[in-house]
Structures are given as C-alpha cells and as structure tokens.
Image (cartoon, rainbow, N blue to C red):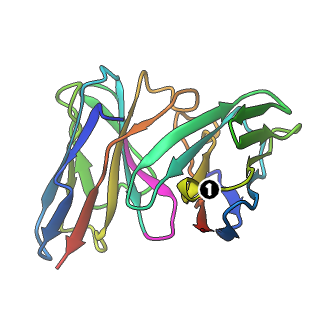
Amino acid sequence: GQQVMQIPQYQHVQEGEDFTTYCNSSTTLSNIQWYKQRPGGHPVFLIQLVKSGEVKKQKRLTFQFGEAKKNSSLHITATQTTDVGTYFCAPPQGGSEKLVFGKGTKLTVNP
Amino acid sequence: DGGITQSPKYLFRKEGQNVTLSCEQNLNHDAMYWYRQDPGQGLRLIYYSQIVNDFQKGDIAEGYSVSREKKESFPLTVTSAQKNPTAFYLCASSMSGLADQETQYFGPGTRLLVL
C-alpha cells in the first residue's frame, strides 16, 4: 500500500527557534491532512491541503503542498513550549477512503 | 473532540484473554475507525465502518474483531489470537466515511497492557 516518509523522526529545538517537518510520497496525492498529538494525548486535526502549491497559515504555523502534490511541509516559526508533540501527515490511501498516517515527527522544545 | 469517548483509559489483560474496548460518539457521524499506535510509530488502521452493520478490515485486522450494531458505537475486541496486543488504541470518527476528504475526530484512547 501507499506509504509516506516523514522526516525528521525527532527534532529538538530551543524555544524561539524555527521547526520544519516534511512529508514525502512517491505518488501524487489528491490531498493531505496534518494532525498534532500532544504527549499522552490523541491526534487533533490541524489542516487539510488540496491544491497544488497551496500555502496555508495558522498563526505561527505554515503548511505547504508541493507543486507536484507529492510532498508537504509544516513550518513553525519561533517555537513555544506549547508546540511540543508529534506532528503527523495523513494523505488518503490511493483509491480508497482510508487515510495513511506517517510515522510522525516528534518535537521537543527546550525552554 | 469531546464527542468521542473511549473506555477504559487503561486496561490490563492476562495472556489468553479476550478484551473489549469501548468507543462511543455523539457527533452523528456515519464512519468510525480503530487505530493502533505503538511507541514512536504512526497510526495503523485496524478496522473501519462507514455505515451501521457494515465494516471493513484495515491494514492490521488479524487478531481483532469489531461490530457496528448502532451508529454511535464501534467496540473493538482484542482476541487471544493477537500476539502482541500491548499498545495505545485510538478510536476516531468522521462525518460520512470519505476519509480522504474529511477530518477525523479522535477519542482519548485506551492503553492496553498484557500481563
């Protein structure tokens, strides 16, 4: 089945530094969703990207969908301790109604 | 996310026993899902249901069973055939089962530990 590669697996930053996680697919995606899971918590939906080259912003978070719709990124500007957690990308599995979750990028922020 | 409840929060099971995890939603969603999460891993789909009285296997269905007798409820049974059941189990729902287009709402999860 379709798989997505999410990098890096772990990222440690100092508070105030920027952070980026990348999601790469070998196949063209119809859309992609991003979720955040706080430590000990459950995934919470952040955003969905649909259009080629789409860029969406949520305060300090910037989401991008590649022109070829094979990759996506999430960038956090000036991280805060509240950003701690694991960020997952989740595109649909080709030809099905299911989502495929990447392994996630675990972000830790040192105050 | 307060519309989905899972119980219990922690569950201990002896080897060889079946155990059932509860998932209830009051969001009036048609579709419900069960995922398994292992440490440092993403979510893997166990079973999903797009409508009452119908469900499909996900990527790792072996050793698990489900039922969908009511729209609000989608219990998961972890059977003794599941060789490594210790994990974090997450239930989710979405409005109509078009998972590739819809937000999924997750419950708080159940941590299962086999003793």
Across and down, in percent, residue B88 comes to 33, 61
Magenta segment boundaries in residue numbering: B39-48
Q: Residue at x 69, y 33 (%)?
A: A31
Residue type, label 1: Gln
Task: Please name the predominant secondary structure of the magenta segment in the image.
Answer: strand
Q: Residue at x 44, y 27 (%)?
A: B97
Crowd around label 1: few <14 · some 14–19 · many ≥20 (10 Å):
some
Instruction: Judge from the rendering whether residue A36 lies leftward or rightward of residue A57; answer left or right.
Output: left
Given residues A89 and A109, the one toward you in this image is A109
Across and down, in percent, residue B78 comes to 21, 59
Question: In which quadrant of the rendered view does residue B37 lie?
Answer: bottom left
The residue at which mark 1 appears reads as A80
Given residues B21 and B81, the one toward you in this image is B21
Instruction: Judge from the rendering whether residue B109 lies leftward or rightward of residue B99; answer left or right.
Output: left
Q: Is residue B92 above or below residue B84?
A: above
Protein chain holding label 1: A
Across and down, in percent, residue B69 comes to 17, 29
Given residues A110 and B35, the one toward you in this image is A110
